[in-house]
Amino acid sequence: MIEEIHCAGCGVAIQTEDTKAPGYAPKSALDREMVICQRCFKLKHYNQIQDVSLSDDDFVKILDGIGQKDALVVKIVDIFDFNGSWLPGLHRFVGKNDVLLVGNKADLLPKSLNPNRLMNWMRQASKELGLRPVDVHLISAKKGHGVDELAEKIDYYRKGRDVYVVGCTNVGKSTLINQVIKRFGEEDEAVITVSHFPGTTLDLIDIPLDDNCNLYDTPGIINHHQMAHYVDAKDLKLITPKKEIKPQVFQIHPQQTLFFGGLARLDYMEGNKRSFVIYMSNELKVHRTKLEKADDLYANHNGELLSPPNEKTREMLPPLVRHEFSLRDNMKTDIVFSGLGWVAVHGKGGRVAAYAPKGVAVSLREALV
Ligand code: GDP
């Protein structure tokens, strides 16, 4: 019988076949006296964690497990896709535990956006979604902005308890944890470990906070309705802003349509001529046409002139669904396309129809800028 080898770091059974599955180590690693899996290897030598995603079943087990602990929950959302990256149902699981809500990717926001206004909006939006966080904090995990202050807040709100960091995939949770590890790593690299979450096959990264408590990084949860799941990696790169968004202003007449690549569409049905200000990736092409020509344009040119998607990936995209909205008289409104960004509309009244792939949310909110 072949003896099973276990990782000296986390104890998982070592396998050499599937690079994505737990316990993977390259064959060459088996010659070593102490074998560790690739995940622990990266953690130990590069202070890097690998992203793992989990099934809905494991997701429920994790949330349920957290609900039964006395802990602080740190929930990360992508402020550029607040609703898309929200974990619906989290509030039902966390029980009495406090939740600290962290908005990541603050570096993408236009300078004209007042951070306090955004945080107030996040509080309000959370309340409407059933969650009352103890505090709200903005960071840029990528740039390291606000991370030290976040560490202080975590220490303050945890009140001697463990901390669980949760978030859906792509919110930047790994980037944040790597920043945290960097800060701890300098003093005591060896103590960061990986452990199993009870009842699942999943590993958690444990970062010790003091003699008794740990910060646990839970695996990224897949939110199926995010735009990110309907485009390929190249298109995702294009629609995800990499730096501060530069708003684009269009003067729009009624009966005109804007296409955002072929991923979304906005018809201006009724109202006065007015400006539409677009807050989306600077690389996403906006195409203007007459409303009467819009259907034909989409039918004949989606994946070409209207891109992304491209000729291959347009097949992955669910059909566009139409959402009709009346605009309020005295409110500057944002029309939010989950995962893509938003369009701010000024002025009085009017009607619009916004289209996004089936399953991807479109919503209205009071303008942030
Ligand atoms: P995870 O799936 O939640 O672990 O997310 P990752 O840490 O892998 O990040 C997902 C994507 O978001 C990557 O392309 C990151 O470069 C990017 N990202 C993470 N944090 C930030 C941030 O603070 N600002 C910006 N602009 N991008 C970020």
Image (tube, rainbow, N blue to C red):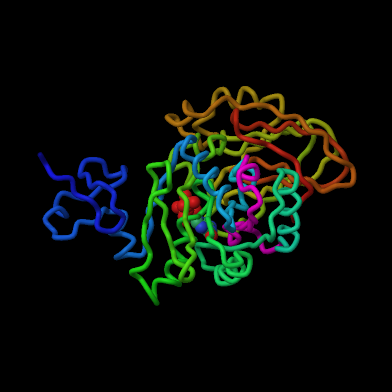
Q: Is residue 90 part of the magenta span, yes or no?
A: yes
Q: Residue 348: x percent and y percent?
A: 88, 43
Q: Is residue 139 left or right of residue 335?
A: left
- Locate the N terminus by quadrant: top left
Q: Is residue 106 part of the magenta span, yes or no?
A: yes
Residue range highlighted in magenta: 89-112
Looking at the rendering, which quadrant does residue 320 occupy? Answer: top right
Q: In this view of the protein, can residue 332 be seen by the observer?
A: yes
- Locate the C terminus by quadrant: bottom right
Q: Residue 305: x percent and y percent?
A: 53, 34
Residue at point 54%, 39% (across, down): 223
Q: In this view of the protein, can residue 251 be seen by the observer?
A: no
Count of numbered marks: 0
Q: Is residue 349 left or right of residue 240?
A: right
Q: Nearer the viewer, residue 351 or 133?
A: 133
Q: Nearer the viewer, residue 30 or 139?
A: 30
Residue at point 54%, 44% (across, down): 63
Q: Residue 360: x percent and y percent?
A: 61, 34
Residue at point 69%, 59% (across, down): 134
